[in-house]
Amino acid sequence: LYFSAQRGILFFDHIKHLQSEMKICADILQPISSLIFSPDYTVLLLISDQGTVYTYKPAHSGEAVKLLDTCSNCFLAADFLTPGDKYCVSVTLSGEVQVWFLEDGTCLSKLNLDIEVHVT
């Protein structure tokens, strides 16, 4: 079970035979608003409420890597484009939809919807 705390800490709680072991996986120093696993569960997207997207690879047990930083135009949501875990799509408050290459954070495509977007 992966979950986050208010201060931007990603936790992993391993539960086995009524025993629970919790460990800190990463600290991004910003509150995390969303956690999204890739379809094959190899990559976890961490989206901060300040508009930054990080990737975390549970099998590698390393730090979260900053992938995207929108600064003034915060992401409302992001998710993987399937199949695979090479691309993600994001949407911003201002209605900009973007497709990203996850290897290096390259923006491959963008479309402006010309409307303000809300996530429910």
Image (tube, grey):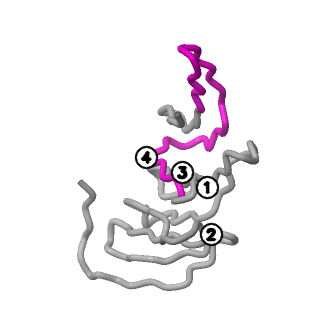
The quarter of the picture where the C terminus appears is: bottom left
Camera-side residue: 26 or 72?
Answer: 26
Residue 1 left/right relative to 77: right
Residue 16 falls inside the magenta stretch: yes
Provide residue 39's location: percent of width, then percent of height: 51, 59
Q: Mark 1 sits on what residue?
A: 43
Q: CA distance from mark 4 to mark 3?
A: 8 Å
Q: Amino acid at mark 4?
A: Ser
Q: Amino acid at mark 2?
A: Leu
Residue at (44, 68) in percent of width and height: 90
Residue at (63, 20) in percent of width and height: 21
- Look at discs 4 and 1 and give the one toward the viewer: 1
Q: Amino acid at mark 1?
A: Val
- Look at the numbered disc 2 and give the secondary structure of its residue: loop
Residue 13 in the image: above or below residue 90? above
Magenta stretch? 12-38
Per the picture, the main secondary structure of the magenta-coloured stretch is: strand
Considering every residue shown, the one lying at the far front of the view is 17
Q: CA distance from mark 1 to mark 2?
A: 10 Å
Q: Mark 2 sits on what residue?
A: 102
Residue 114 in the image: above or below residue 74? below
